[in-house]
Amino acid sequence: MSKKKKIIVLASMVALLVLTGCLNYFLNRPTSDPANAEGSLTYSDYFSASRADRSAAREEAVLYYTMIKNDEASSAEAKANAEAELAALAAGVDTEQRLETLIKSLGFEDCIVTVGKENINVIVKSDALTEQEAAQLLDMVCSETGKSVGYVRVKSIDL
């Protein structure tokens, strides 16, 4: 394939990725103001918005890596990297869902977990975490993921 065709294919893939992101944003935007009567954000709005943002970002990444993997012009190394990234995304989704379920089983009403390449972030719905609750969350996340305490961040939000 000529260099010009490769550039056109790559530009097309980037344009599709941008278009997908824009469509996702416009189709998943809330139809009403997320603020309550007092003008502050509610817990459910915060956690719903966080989940929607996480899902949108993940969908864009999956689309991008899938396009690389399926593009005949991609090198074998690029295809292998794309496949590895897709596998890592799938593993991250599984870990996030498992941790969120376990955290809710500890008595927290709602939470959001994001698993990155290095760090894991946990945000729970709570006025304030006690030392015992924070330790319990850290222990559970570390034992489930094999990460050390230094790579796990736990935070409570009080909206």
Image (cartoon, rainbow, N blue to C red):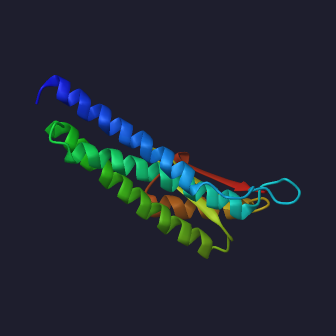
Residue 158 is drawn in which quadrant?
A: bottom right
Q: Residue furthest right?
A: 38
* Residue 28 percent across, percent down from the top left: 56, 56
Quarter of the rendering occupied by the C terminus: bottom right
Q: How many marks?
A: 0
Q: Is residue 50 left or right of residue 109?
A: left
* Residue 31 percent across, percent down from the top left: 67, 58
Q: Is residue 56 left or right of residue 14?
A: right
Q: What residue is rendered at 55% in x and 66% in y? A: 100
Q: Nearer the viewer, residue 63 or 23?
A: 23
Quarter of the rendering occupied by the N terminus: top left
Is residue 132 at least partly visible in the picture?
Answer: no
Q: Residue furthest top?
A: 3
Q: Residue furthest left?
A: 1
- Up-down: is 102 above or below 30? below
Q: Nearer the viewer, residue 48 or 120?
A: 48
Q: What residue is rendered at 69% in x and 71% in y? A: 109
Q: What residue is rendered at 42% in x and 48% in y? A: 60
* Residue 133 percent across, percent down from the top left: 69, 64
Q: Is residue 82 left or right of residue 111?
A: left
Is residue 145 at least partly visible in the picture?
Answer: yes
Q: Nearer the viewer, residue 47 or 96?
A: 47
